[in-house]
Amino acid sequence: MEVKVLDFNGKDTGRKVQLSDSVFAIEPNNHAVYLDVKQYLANQRQGTHKAKERAEVAGSTRKIKKQKGTGTARAGSAKNPLFKGGGTVFGPRPRSYSFKLNKNLKRLARKSAFSIKAKESNIIVLEDFNFETPNTKNFINVLKALELENKKSLFVLGNTNKNVYLSSRNLKASSVVSSSELSTYEILNANNLVLLESSLEVIEENLSK
């Protein structure tokens, strides 16, 4: 599919680029997308939750009352989970929620995400640009020129660009990543995908393997 190239002022440069059908026009695999997004979100979890169990709470281990004759249930310790201040039964323990996925499946998921965005016409191709110094106002002007100031957008750079990245860092609705850092979740989470020209070659090279 052909997409026109815009400059950072939102003007048509008169040029068009051909997006690879093997990356931007495949039949989306919803299950691959689901698994890749699930893995991304699982990796964001710290897994540092912890509840004290019977052996960890403070308290005496002496038998608090005689075994028989009280008319109530037997009790051997104040740490009994049935008592206030006792240990937690099967409480959460620190753990990792991460899991592995096949590289080919992750590649398929990203191609599916790109194809979904292309089908919805939510991909913008922008010629490469840079700022002399980090400047949030300049980045906001780019968003306004592309009519994205009120939309969630993801800018994909071919190579790391510190000035552009720092200019966008204070904006909640917009984010900037390099093409090598792209994830399926980030692609789908954005309303509009802004691909800089230099990122196209890297994306197609990485996903056509």
Image (cartoon, rainbow, N blue to C red):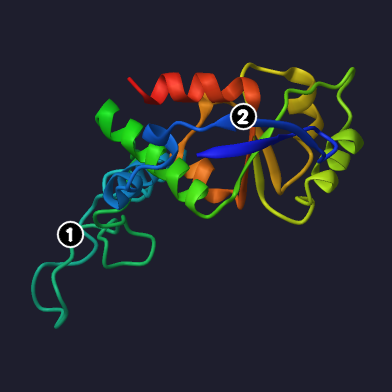
* Along the line of sight, the residue nearer the viewer: 201 or 61: 201
193 vs 163: above or below: below
Type of amino acid at the residue the image marks with label 2: Val
- Secondary structure of the residue carrying numbered label 1: loop
- Secondary structure of the residue carrying numbered label 2: strand
139 vs 35: above or below: above
In front: label 2 or label 1: 2
C-alpha span from label 2 to label 1 = 59 Å
Q: Residue 76: give its label.
A: 1
**Where is residue 88 shown, x and y percent of the image?**
31, 56
Type of amino acid at the residue the image marks with label 1: Gly
* Along the line of sight, the residue nearer the viewer: 98 or 65: 98
4 vs 76: above or below: above
Residue that appears at 91% across and 37% down: 137
Q: Residue 177: give its label.
A: 2
Image quadrant in which the C terminus is located: top left
Residue that appears at 67% across and 51% down: 152
Label 2 crowd (10 A; few <14 / some 14-19 / many >=20): some
In the figure, is residue 153 to the left or right of 34?
Answer: right
Residue that appears at 27% across and 34% down: 105
* Along the line of sight, the residue nearer the viewer: 54 or 92: 92
In the figure, is residue 199 to the left or right of 81?
Answer: right
